[in-house]
Amino acid sequence: MKKSILVALMVILSLLIRSEGNARSKIINMTCDQQLENNITLFMPNFVRTMEIIGTLLRTSRNGTAISGTGPDGNYGLGQCYGDLSPQDCILCYAEARTILPSCFPHNGGRIYLDGCFMRVQNYSFFHEYTGPNDMVVCGNTTAKSGLFGAAVREAVGNAVVEGSGNWDYFARGESVVNVNESVFVMADCWRTLSPAECRRCLENASAAISKCLPSSEGRALNSGCFMRYSDTDFLNPIPVATISSNRGMVLAIVVSIVSSVTVLTVALMIILYIMKHRLIQKKRRGSYDAKKLSKMLNDSSLHFKYSTIEKATSNWNECNKLGQGGFGTVYKGVLSDGREIAVKRLFFNNKFRATDFYNEVNMISSVEHKNLVRLLGCSCSGPESILVYEYLPNLSLDRFIFDATKGKTLNWQKRFLIISGTAEGLVYLHENTKNRIIHRDIKAANILLDLRLRAKIADFGLARSFQDDQSHISTAIAGTLGYMAPEYLAHGQLTEKADVYSFGVLLLEIVTGMENNKSKTAEYTDSLVSIVWNHFQEDTVEEIFDPNLMMQHYVNTNDLKEIKKVIQVGLLCTQEAPSLRPSMSIVLKMLAKDETLPLPSNPPFIDEKTMELNDISDKLQFYNYGDNDCSIATVSHSDFYPR
Ligand SMILES: *[C@@H]1O[C@H](CO)[C@@H](O)[C@H](O)[C@H]1NC(C)=O
Ligand SMILES: *[C@@H]1O[C@H](CO)[C@@H](O)[C@H](O)[C@H]1NC(C)=O
Ligand SMILES: *[C@@H]1O[C@H](CO)[C@@H](O)[C@H](O)[C@H]1NC(C)=O
Ligand SMILES: *[C@@H]1O[C@H](CO)[C@@H](O)[C@H](O)[C@H]1NC(C)=O
Ligand SMILES: *[C@@H]1O[C@H](CO)[C@@H](O)[C@H](O)[C@H]1NC(C)=O
Ligand SMILES: *[C@@H]1O[C@H](CO)[C@@H](O)[C@H](O)[C@H]1NC(C)=O
Ligand SMILES: *[C@@H]1O[C@H](CO)[C@@H](O)[C@H](O)[C@H]1NC(C)=O
C-alpha cells in the first residue's frame, strides 16, 4: 500500500521535474529555390527582418510566420518547432535553422527540415501549400526489419494521421509495440497555417511516402506542409511540455499533504535516485548535439552575453542605434547597464557556424589582442541569433574623414601618418602572430576605425578566415571590396598575406590623395587611383595629387613632404602586380619608420574594373556606414548585469 503511493507520487513528480529535452537540431535536408533574388538592395533587409520576427515569435510560441516587404522581393517566412520541444529547445533548434538557411542566398527562397523544427522563406505566400514537387522522403537506416515491424509502422503512422490533423496543435506522437524487445516510435507535425483538411491531406501523402522506406528501421517524410518520422529508437521527448504547468498545482497539493509523513526521507531518496537515472538515460539519448553541455560551457564563459542583455543594450534593435551594415551582419550601438558602450554585430550570413563552432571561433578571435585591432568582447552564441559584441569606437571609420572635405581637415599629416603606422602594426600582428595567422581580406578605409585620440584600429578581422572553406557566392562577393582586392585574388582566388598588402597599398594612396579608389567607376575620374598615382610618380609630379586638405595646413614642412612622398612610394610598392615583389607587412613597417632609400616600384596591375563580372554589393557593406544618428538611447535597467 505504502509502496504504491510512493510509486504514484514519483510518477507525478517526474512530470514536474522535467529535465531539458532534446532540441533535435540535426539537419535532415535543405532545398534552395532555383530563382535568384530580384534586387538585392530590397531583398536583404526583408529577408533579415523575416528571420528576426520569426525568431522573436518562437521565443514565446512554437510557431511563427512573418511577411516583410511586398512585390518580387517581399519575404514570406514560416518557422515551427514540433510539438514535443520545450521553449528552450525550440530556440536552440531554430538557432540552427536560421544559421544554415541563409546559405540559400542569393536564391530567393528555401526550406530546411531539422529533426525538431522547420523553416521556410519565399517571395510569395506559401502558407497553404501542403504537397509539392520538392517533397521527399529520407530513409535512415538500411538495416532490414521484419514484416511485423512494417505492420507496426503502418499502424502507428495511420494513427498519427488521424490524431495529427485532429489535435489543436497538429502534433501527434505514438508508439506501437512490435514484440517484447521492440517498438516503433512515430511523430507527425503539420504547419499551423494549414486548415485541418489540408493538414490531413498532407499527412496522408506523407504516410504513403514514408512507408516506402520499409523495411528500413528509420524513415522521414519532408512535405511542403508537414513532417513525419518513424524509428525503432525512441527519439521523442519524454513529456509534451504543454501539460506541465497544469499539473503543477495538483502536484504541489499532494506534496504539501504528504510533507508531514514519516516516509518523507525515503521519498526524497528515491526521487533523487530516479532523477539521476532519468538524467543518465537522457544523456545517452542525446546525440552529438549536447545542448546542456553547450549551455553550461557558455554560462561559465566570460565571453558569453545573454541575448536579453544585448537586446536591452540596443533598445530592442532600435533603428536609431544602427551604425552600419557590415559584410557579415548589421552593426548596432549598444549601452550596457554599467554604462559601457559596445558595438553589436548581428550576423545574418553565417552559414558555417553552429552554436559550438561559433563559440570556438569567437574564443579564437577574442584571443587576438593588439592595440591596433578592434577588440571582440564576446558573443551571444546560443540565443536565437548569432551576435558578436565589440568595443565601441566613437569616431567611427577613417573613410568618414579622409573622403570628406570638411572632416578631412581634422586629420593633419602627423595624425594620418600615425594612422598609417598603426594600421601597419595591426596587420603585422595579424599576419605574424604564431598562434593563428590571419589574413584580413578586406582592408579598406571603412574598416579602419578611429578611437577618441584618432588612433587606428582594424575592424572585422578573423571572420573572413572562418569562411575560407566556404565556396558560396556570398562569401566571395563579401570577403573583399572591389578596388582594394589584389588582382591575383580577384582573378584566381589566390589568397596570401600579399593580398592584404595590396589593399593596404591602396589605402595609403587614398590617405595621401583624399581620393576614393572606388569612385573610379563614376564619371569623377575614370582611371583607377593606383594608375593615376603611378602615372604621376613616373612623371615626378606626385605633389599635384596630394589631398588639398593636407596642403592647406600651414605647418606642412619639408620633412612632412618628404614623408608623404615616401608613403606614396611604399603604396606603389605594395600595389605592384606581382605578389612576390610586394613587401611583407613587417618590411612595410620598417620602410615607414626608417629613413632609407626605397626600391623603385614596378608597375601596378592595370585592370579595367568595369569588365570584371563581380557582384559588387560589398561597396555598401562596411562596419560603420550610417550617418550620425542623433536619437538618444534609452537608459537600460540595472537588473541585467553582464557578463556572466
Ligand atoms: C537533400 O536531398 C537532396 C536530394 O536527395 C540531396 O541531393 C541533398 O544532398 C540533400 N541535402 C542535404 C543537406 O542533406
Ligand atoms: C533596387 O531597388 C532600389 C530601391 O528601390 C533601386 O534604387 C535600385 O535601382 C534597384 N536596383 C536594381 C538593380 O534594380
Ligand atoms: C501559431 O499558429 C496558430 C494557428 O495558426 C495561431 O493562432 C498563432 O497565432 C500562431 N502563433 C504565432 C506566434 O504566430
Ligand atoms: C519572386 O521572385 C522571382 C525572381 O526574383 C520573380 O520572377 C517573381 O515574380 C517573384 N514572385 C512574386 C510573387 O513576386
Ligand atoms: C504526394 O504529393 C506529391 C506532390 O503533389 C505527389 O507527387 C505524390 O504522388 C503524392 N503521393 C501520394 C502517395 O499521394
Ligand atoms: C541502424 O539500426 C541498427 C538497429 O536498428 C543500429 O544498431 C545501427 O546502429 C543503425 N545504424 C545507423 C547508421 O544508424
Ligand atoms: C527478445 O530478446 C531476448 C534476449 O535478447 C531474446 O532471447 C528473445 O528471443 C527476444 N524476443 C523476440 C521476440 O525477439
Image: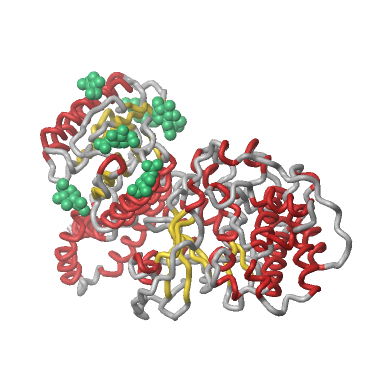
Left/right of residue 613 with respect to residue 19 in the rendered view: right
Q: Is 349 rendered above or below residue 27? A: below
Q: Position of residue 223 (x, y in %)?
A: 27, 31
State the colouring used for the structure image. secondary structure
Whether 414 is drawn above or below 475: the answer is below
User: Looking at this view, is 357 or 634 the one in front?
Assistant: 634
Which quadrant is the N terminus positioned in? bottom left
- Specify whether 231 is left or right of 497: left
Q: Nearer the viewer, residue 557 or 351?
A: 557
> In the shown orientation, is residue 576 left or right of residue 266?
right
Residue 9, image quadrant: bottom left
Q: Residue at x 33, y 44 (%)?
A: 116
**Between residues 556 and 423, which one lies in front from this camera angle?**
556
Judge whether residue 201 can be spotted in this image.
Answer: yes
Residue at 42% over, 48% down: 99
Q: Is residue 203 above or below residue 329?
A: above
Q: Nearer the viewer, residue 417 or 360?
A: 417
Residue 487 location in percent, x, y?
67, 42
Q: Quick check: can you spot residue 187?
A: no
Quarter location, residue 176:
top left
Position in image of residue 355 (x %, y %): 46, 52
Rendered image quadrant of residue 309: bottom left
Q: Outermost residue, right direction?
A: 597
Residue at 54% across, 58% down = 362
- How many marks the image carries: the answer is 0
| Residue 264 percent location from the top left of the image | 26, 69
Residue occupying the point 55% across, 60% down: 446
